[in-house]
Structures are given as C-alpha cells and as structure tokens.
Image: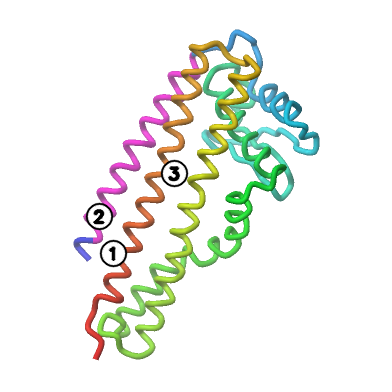
Amino acid sequence: MIGYYILIGAIALVSWLVSNQLKKKFAFYSKVQLRNGMSGKEIAEKMLSDNGIYDVEVISTPGQLTDHYNPKNKTVNLSESVYNQKNAASAAVAAHECGHAVQHAQAYQWLQMRSSLVPVVSVTSGMSQWLIIGGLILGGAAGIGLGWYVAVLGVIFMGMATIFSFITLPVEYDASNKALAWLKAKNMVTPDEYKGSEDALKWAARTYLVAAIGALASLLYWALQVFGGSRD
C-alpha cells in the first residue's frame, strides 16, 4: 500500500502543478482583450452558425472552468466569466466547447464512444477500488475463491474508467484543433490573441493527459496486486 500512496501522491502533485499552471494561463490570457469586442457567448454562437449548427443553445453555467458541451440537450455551457468576457481565454474556451458540438454534428467516432461509456463509467468508477480492496481482504491476493473474483471485477471496472480517460484524449485534442482552426480561418483573433488561445488550450489538454496517465498507473498497480499474487 505504501507504494500505491507514493504513486498517487506523485500523480496528485503533477496534476496540481498542471492545474495550477492552467489557472495562471487563463488568468493571464483573460487580460488579453479581443479587438473584435466579442464575448464568449458571441464567439460560440458564430462558430456554431459557421458550421451550420442551429439546434445548439449557448447558455451560462455557474462556477469557474465548468465549461462543457452537453450532447443530451445540445447545449454549450459556458462558465459565467467565459460567457460574458471578451478576451483570448474566453474565445479559446467558447470555441473549444463548440468544437464538441461540431464533433456531435459530424458523428465523430471518439465522441460517440465516450458518450456510450458515460452511463457505465459513472456507476462503476466509484466502485472499482472498493471492490479490489474488498476482494483482496477476502483472499484475492492469494487467488482464493470469491475474493479473487470480486477483486478481478474491480480491476475490470477500473479498466473501463481507464479506457474512458484515454478515449477522452482524442476528443479533447480534436475539439481544440477545430477551435483553433476556426479562430484562424475566420480571422476571429489577431496573431497575438491566437497565440494566447492556443497556449491556454494546450494547458487544458494537459490536464486530461495527466488524468489518463494517473488512471493507467493506478490500474497497473491494482492489477499487479490482484494478478501478481500466488495462486494455489
């Protein structure tokens, strides 16, 4: 268990560093005002319109960095600051979330796969570690009876969450690429503003990368505990 706590601690530290840097980047680029004077809401609505998407609503949602696209009710949810502000950071976030709407409209394969896993992962992810620990206590580490099967079920559940994390990567990177390509093609931002938007989205993507690596590391550790024991 000591090794696991060291691993989780290291991953948590890296995650905190990346998250902290992301917040600093967004705070910095929030001060870079757009010359076109458009708010995040207006940026989002124009990107949707330019891509022929008219059935998606842009709405404001409480919180900071709570921006997301909801494929169920077809809404681009922008945090209050992004929704109202007129800067490089808000333009980047608004366009990124609209990138997901474009993916949905185009039936992007990776987005469809992620959406299909959401109901399952939302239930199994919280149970996986407890099943593994419970199974190990019941004798799973030695490959004994019911405990081993319970632990294996936990590993399978954790594996599904890990797969979800890695499927999320191409979804997020592609949404950012779509956003940046549109911002440049439509001359929505100046070169300096574009650099700010690009840098902000790169750091946002790194949070997903760290999360995926953390999920894989955790899966490998627990799988070793379950399958690495001696089976009589």
Residue 41 position within the rendered picture, expressed as x and y whole percent measured from the top left: 68, 25
Q: Secondary structure at mark 1?
A: helix
Q: Nearer the viewer, residue 77 or 43?
A: 43
Say which mark, if any, is on residue 208: 3
Q: Quadrant of residue 176?
A: top right
Badge 1 density bin: few <14, some 14–19, many ≥20, Cα 10 Å: some
Whether the magenta-drawn stretch holds residue 165 is answered as no
18 over 5 or under it: above or below: above
Q: Residue at position x 64%, y 26% from top?
A: 83
Give the mark, 3 or 1, whose residue is nearer the N terminus.
3
Quadrant placement of the C terminus: bottom left
Of badges 1 and 2, the one in the foreground is 1
**CA distance separating discs 2 and 3:** 18 Å
Query: Which residue is the site of mark 1?
Result: 221
What amino acid is found at the position of numbered circle 2 in the picture? Leu
Residue occupying the far top of the picture: 35
Which is nearer the eye, 27 or 114?
Answer: 114
Helix, strand or loop at disc 3? helix
Q: Which residues are magenta?
A: 4-31
* 10 Å crowding of disc 2: few (<14), some (14-19), many (20+): some
- Of the 4 image quadrants, the one containing the N terminus is bottom left
Number of other residues with Cα within 10 Å of mark 3, as a class: few under 14, some 14 to 19, many 20 or more: some
The residue pinned by badge 2 equals: 7
Image spot of residue 9 (x, y percent): 26, 51
Dots 2, 3 in contact, CB < 8 A: no
